[in-house]
Amino acid sequence: MAAKILVYYRKTDQQEEFEDYYFNVHLPIVRKISQIKDLKIARVVHSNDTVDDLYLHGEILFENMETLKEAIESPEGQAMFEDAKKMRKFFKNPPITTFVEFVD
């Protein structure tokens, strides 16, 4: 079954700086991961009275969980996580990050 890394970013007081870094530095690093099957970025427009400050959603699709694990252990995957740590300076709390495996 397919697997994904899902990341939810909250609103920040440094929105313009974050977006510049995210789209021009971070995403090019992420795109170097050869195992990625699909990559989608979306703006959160509604969260149904759950987390009210969600703002951006990243979704990275892999063939399966084994491929996802290979990807994050690769030098490119490690570079993605190292760069993600640098982006924390834009936020009070780190983004919500989950690894999910499809069940159906």
Image (tube, helix red, strand yellow):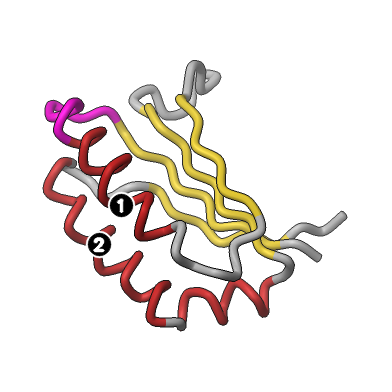
Q: Disc 2 designates what residue?
A: 83
Q: Is the residue under label 2 in contact with that under label 1 (CB below 8 Å)?
A: yes
Q: Is residue 73 left or right of residue 4?
A: left
Q: Residue at position x 52%, y 50% from top?
A: 6
Q: Is residue 75 left or right of residue 63?
A: left
* Precedes in sequence: disc 1 or disc 2: 1
Q: Which quadrant holds residue 2?
A: bottom right
Q: Residue at position x 63%, y 51% from top?
A: 38
Task: Say which quadrant the C terminus sits in.
Answer: bottom right
Q: Residue at position x 67%, y 79% from top?
A: 66
Task: Say which quadrant the N terminus sits in.
Answer: bottom right
Range covered by the magenta-colored residues: 11-17
Q: Residue at position x 18%, y 41% from top?
A: 91
Magenta region includes residue 12? yes
Q: Position of residue 42 (x, y in %)?
A: 50, 30
Question: Mark 1: which amino acid?
Answer: His
